[in-house]
Image (spheres, rainbow, N blue to C red):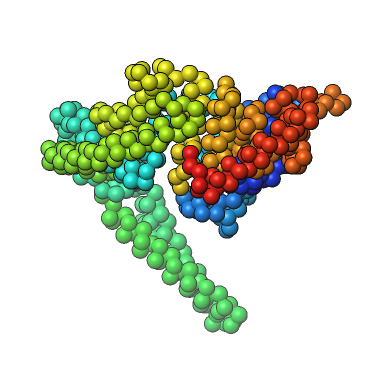
């Protein structure tokens, strides 16, 4: 239920705060006073699209905030938890702000949400019905929603069918994709087998290319390595023509030992010299071993270069690196195994698709049976309600007939309408007038309001257009009946409806300093009498018209009491 609506800088609404009642909230005022603007502001917090035009002239932003009481709305509570939106009590605060720069900020209980999430939340909160929504009755998706929502069993079966249909479509898509793949499988198999054979024949190992490059580098510089290592050996060991470093150090050691025999201070250098000699002898040993182990085979170099060329070729074809080539090998090997088993895979997919289709057909059959029963019940209830709205001979029939399975089921749904005795039932879209559509829509809404599954608040935006007299009184009683079960916000120009109000709000325009502003105020009992008199007789309110207004309000109070006590049913 909507408790409070606060609006800032929204078209003609500069700053307005309204506290609504639980029953019937009536909004009246002269044409152009801004009544529909207020409903548009409510639509903003329910997820309706907005344009920058709603921002009041001269302002940088527009904001709407609504507080709802969501006690008992278990589905909404579950959805809030699913979206990680704060849900600590039964109050829901929705704020939406739009700036002239196009920034759209939406907060639900202080949490930022997207417009899509807000629109989903709005579906749980209120149903806005205006003149344009009458045409929505003619859309197939709305007709199925009406039918399936009319009884819990149909709602459950529709959800079960939806899941079964989706599973069938997914199974069929998987089978189709596999069969499409199978049509090109021969060429693909040949290519994959050739690639696997080419890579496997190379017998690659991890980082093999790095080892090859290092060995090729060594073999390619064999002559320079040989010359340099021999030069190092000669410098260390010496040869026939010269002493090496080790020989020279031996003479240095002998000289120092001679000096040490006569001077102890000279002996301090001998340990360091011994260390240097030992290290250089180790270096000489290593150099001699490296030289003796040198083996340069031109044939080996050719073989290594050929091997590296093979690896480079594979890298260019399959990924740019040895790691990528080996990953590609693993991938296509798995794909090849999968494709070579495609016959058995397709057989399994066909079995799964057939089973999913069988389940979808069974779910569709159960849903169709429930829809047939629901259509008969709903048709009778709506036709009964039409009679109470001044259409005693009208009959509305929801006709369910077999059809191909779609996302909505295996049914076609037509709404047939007969306005007068002796006429033939015809599709609603072809014969219903605008006024008739308004009453049909009201009849449907009032029937829906009797069910617990309908939203807590309903908004009627001038649904009474084109009616008057006795019919207006019937429409008023019907709206009052809806308000006995649900919160209703209703814009009306009919005094018969306005006098049913539990809370009556009057909208008026005022101009000051070149700006026009819409004001909203709750009418007192005395002010309501005057407003009813104005609506009934025009601007010239007389004592007689005031007496008539009081009588209408007393009569309306008695009717509401009957409706709420259950003594009177519509």
Residue 345 shows up from this direction: no
Viewed as shown, does residue 4 lie left or right of 310?
right
- Residue 403, relative to residue 209: is it above or below? above
> Could you tell me which residue is drawn at 70 percent across and 42 percent down?
18
Q: Nearer the viewer, residue 33 or 329?
A: 33
> Could you tell me which residue is drawn at 47 percent across and 67 percent down?
249
Q: Position of residue 51 (x, y in %)?
A: 63, 27
Q: Nearer the viewer, residue 162 or 98?
A: 162
- Total count of labels: 0
Asked where in the image residue 316 lies, by quadrant, the reply is top left
> Could you tell me which residue is drawn at 46 percent across and 26 percent down?
391
Asked where in the image residue 242 lies, by quadrant, the reply is bottom left
Residue 478 shows up from this direction: yes
Q: Position of residue 382 (x, y in %)?
A: 42, 33
Q: Nearer the viewer, residue 557 or 41?
A: 557
Viewed as shown, does residue 151 lie left or right of 254?
left
Q: Position of residue 371 (x, y in %)?
A: 31, 37
Viewed as shown, does residue 236 lie left or right of 405?
right
Asked where in the image residue 118 lies, by quadrant, the reply is top right
Q: Position of residue 279 (x, y in %)?
A: 44, 67
Viewed as shown, does residue 103 lie left or right of 72?
right
> Could you tell me which residue is drawn at 44 percent across and 27 percent down?
392
């Amino acid at each position: 239920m909507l408790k409070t609506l606060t609006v800032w800088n929204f078209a003609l609404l500069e700053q307005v705060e309204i506290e609504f009642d639980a029953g019937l909230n009536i909004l009246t005022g002269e044409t152009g006073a801004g009544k529909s603007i207020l409903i548009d502001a409510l639509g903003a917090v329910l997820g309706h699209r907005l344009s920058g035009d709603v921002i009041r002239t001269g302002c940088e932003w527009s904001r709407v905030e609504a507080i709802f009481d969501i006690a008992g709305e278990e589905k909404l509570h579950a959805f809030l938890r699913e979206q990680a939106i704060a849900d600590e009590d039964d109050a829901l605060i929705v704020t939406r702000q739009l700036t002239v720069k196009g920034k759209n900020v939406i907060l639900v209980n202080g949490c930022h949400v997207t417009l899509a999430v807000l629109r989903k939340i709005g579906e749980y909160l209120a149903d806005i019905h205006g003149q344009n929504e009458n045409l929505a009755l003619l859309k197939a998706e709305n007709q199925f929603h009406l039918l399936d929502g009319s009884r819990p069993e149909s709602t459950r079966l529709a959800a079960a069918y939806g899941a079964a249909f989706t599973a069938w479509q997914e199974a069929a898509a998987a089978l189709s994709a596999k069969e499409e793949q199978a049509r090109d499988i021969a060429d693909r198999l040949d290519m994959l087998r050739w690639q696997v054979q080419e890579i496997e024949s190379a017998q690659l190992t991890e980082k093999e290319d790095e080892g090859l490059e290092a060995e090729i580098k060594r073999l390619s510089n064999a002559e320079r390595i040989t010359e340099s290592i021999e030069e190092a050996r000669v410098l260390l060991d010496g040869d026939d023509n010269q002493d090496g470093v080790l020989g020279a150090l031996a003479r240095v050691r002998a000289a120092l030992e001679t000096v040490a025999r006569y001077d102890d201070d000279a002996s301090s250098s001998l340990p360091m010299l011994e260390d240097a000699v030992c290290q250089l002898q180790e270096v000489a040993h290593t150099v001699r071993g490296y030289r003796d182990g040198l083996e340069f085979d031109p044939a080996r170099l050719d073989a290594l270069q050929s091997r590296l060329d093979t690896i480079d070729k594979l890298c260019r074809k399959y990924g740019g690196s040895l790691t990528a080539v080996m990953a590609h090998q693993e991938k296509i090997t798995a794909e090849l195994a999968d494709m070579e088993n495609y016959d058995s895979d397709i057989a399994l997919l066909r079995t799964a698709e057939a089973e999913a289709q069988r389940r979808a057909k069974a779910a569709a059959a159960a849903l169709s049976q429930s829809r047939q029963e629901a259509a008969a019940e709903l048709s009778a209830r709506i036709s009964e309600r039409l009679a109470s709205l001044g259409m005693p001979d009208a009959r509305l029939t929801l006709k369910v007939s077999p059809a191909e399975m779609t996302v909505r089921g295996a049914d076609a749904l037509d709404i047939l309408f007969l306005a007068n005795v002796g006429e033939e039932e015809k599709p609603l879209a072809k014969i219903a007038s605008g006024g008739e559509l308004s009453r049909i829509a009201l009849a449907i809404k009032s029937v829906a309001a009797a069910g617990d599954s309908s939203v807590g608040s309903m908004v009627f935006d001038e649904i009474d257009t084109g009616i008057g007299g006795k019919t207006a009184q019937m429409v008023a009683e019907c709206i009052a009946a809806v308000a006995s079960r649900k919160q209703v916000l209703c814009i009306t120009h009919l005094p018969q409806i306005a006098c049913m109000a539990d809370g009556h709000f009057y909208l008026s325009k005022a101009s000051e300093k070149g700006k026009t502003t819409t004001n909203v105020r709750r009418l007192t009992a005395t002010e309501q009498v005057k407003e009813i008199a104005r609506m009934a007789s025009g601007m010239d309110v007389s004592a007689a018209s005031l007496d008539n207004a009081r009588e209408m309000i007393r009569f309306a109070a008695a009717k509401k009491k009957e409706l709420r006590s259950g003594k009177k049913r519509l």
